[in-house]
Structures are given as structure tokens and as C-alpha cells.
Amino acid sequence: MNAAVVIPARMGSTRLPGKVLEDIDGVPLLVHVMRRAEAATQVARVIVATDDARIADLVERHDGEARMTRLDHQTGTDRVAEVAAGLEDDLIVNVQGDNLDLDPSVIDAVVAGLRQTHRQVVTPVVRFPEEHDVADASKVKVVLAQDGRAVYFSRQPVPSGGPWWLHIGVYGFHAATLQEFARLPQSKLECAEGLEQLRLIEHGIEIDTVRVARPATSIDTPHDLASARSLHSSSTLRH
């Protein structure tokens, strides 16, 4: 089964508009993410899905592939689904465009999980790092069943008292399941939490997880951006 990465990218981030174009160690954030995705060994191609010509131009200037999408998508996964509908790949991996230092092996682990035939959606989780504040709403927590399925995602510290698992912003889909997601209406839980993956759970589509060793740095706020600029060097970000 062929796999492709599709990275949704837009200028209108609520907390940090235009963040994908922000410079980190001389390279735009989105290009860092592209390079990480391109280093994964289990995917055949990496595509950026965007509704903004400035982003498409940036991608092409850095020898990447960009596809223009509609302006009215409700979520990044809906944007990914539009691009994926025109691809022949069996597996689609949605990599969030702000995952600054995502380990390429995480993408490979998601693809490997999808190749287990009973799994339709796979996402990575990691033990909640001690240095993070569990009450930080930008750090999404996952409640896991004993078999590793995701029971719920929340910006709140659930379950009460832990143990807490941190969600990493990568979603792997079988292509048909991704298109099913895009046809579903937004759910009440999705809107309440601001987390699109809850659309799947509320409509009865199971999400399996893979446990990985380390988190990725998600750039959600101006503070995140400032921290990334001070902590990351070209030797740790470039390949």
C-alpha cells in the first residue's frame, strides 16, 4: 500500500497568524516540517495543501509540491481530504504544519500501524513530558483504552489524576476513511474541544494509537515561537 504525506497549511491560525512562514534558524517553519516528512522512509511523496498562494510559492521555491484547495474548509483534515481525493495512494498521513521537530520515524510508525489491516485511522501518542504543564490547553491529552484505542481527546487534563498521554499532530488514514471523514458533519464534541479527530469518535470510527518515544514541538503561540527560536539550532533542525 502506497503512502503519501499531506501537510495542511494556511495563513489564518487563530493564535499565531501566518506562523507557517515564520523564520526559525533561517528556515521557514513549514519548510522544517516538509524536510522532516521527506525524511520518512515509508512514504512516496510529500504534498502541502493550502488555500494561499504565498504558501504555495514558498513550497515551490524550496523544491516542494503544493496543491491549492478551496478556502472554506472547516479543518486541516478536510483540506487534506480534498487533495487526497485526487491521489492514487492507499494511505494518507496528515502531518500538522507546525510540528517543528517531528521525528520522521513517527510518520513511519503511523504508516506501519495502518498496514495492519484492521486499523483505519492511526495517530501517535507519547507519555506526557514532565516539563510540560498538563493544564496547558495547547497540549492535547488522549485517554486510551487498554487495547490502545483512543477513547477521547481533550485540551483539559483528562483522565483526572492521570496517567496522561500527549497527542502528536499526525493522523494516518486509509484513503476511503479519510473521504468518509470529510463527508461527515462537524460533531458537537469536535466543536466543543476544537479537535477535529473527535468527529471520528463521535461518529463511531475507531482511532488506534502508536506509542512513540518523544514528542514534537508544536508552534501554537508567540511564546512557542520565541522558545523555538532560542532553543533550536540549525544542527538539530536540518537534514
Image (spheres, rainbow, N blue to C red):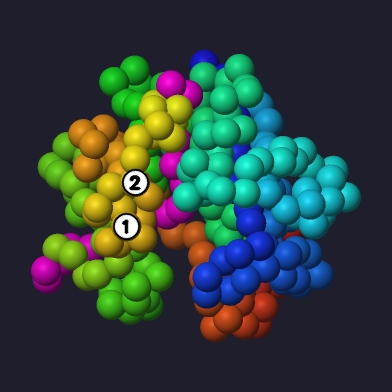
> Which mark is on residue 186?
2
Residue range corresponding to the magenta coloring: 160-176
Residue 26's place in the image compared with 206, above or below, is: below
User: Count of labels shown?
Assistant: 2
Question: Residue at (73%, 53%) from the top-left corner?
Answer: 52
- Front-most of residues 109 and 3: 3
State the image coordinates of residue 23 (x, y, percent, origin top left): 75, 71
Residue 210's place in the image compared with 25, above or below, is: above
Identity of the amino acid at label 2? Answer: Gln
Residue placed furthest toward the right = 61
Question: Residue at (34%, 73%) from the top-left corner?
Answer: 137
Residue 137: say if magenta. Answer: no
Residue 164: say if magenta. Answer: yes
Assess whether mark 1 and mark 2 are in contact (beta carbons under 8 angstroms): yes
Say left or right for 102 vs 119.
right
- Front-most of residues 192 and 146: 192
Identity of the amino acid at label 1? Answer: Cys
> Which mark is on residue 60?
none
- Front-most of residues 228 and 153: 153
Q: Which residue is mark 1?
A: 191
**Which image quadrant for residue 67?**
top right
The answer, for residue 127, to whether it is visible in the render is: no
State the image coordinates of residue 7 (x, y, percent, origin top left): 61, 45
Say left or right for 111 vs 203.
right
- Front-most of residues 27 and 206: 206
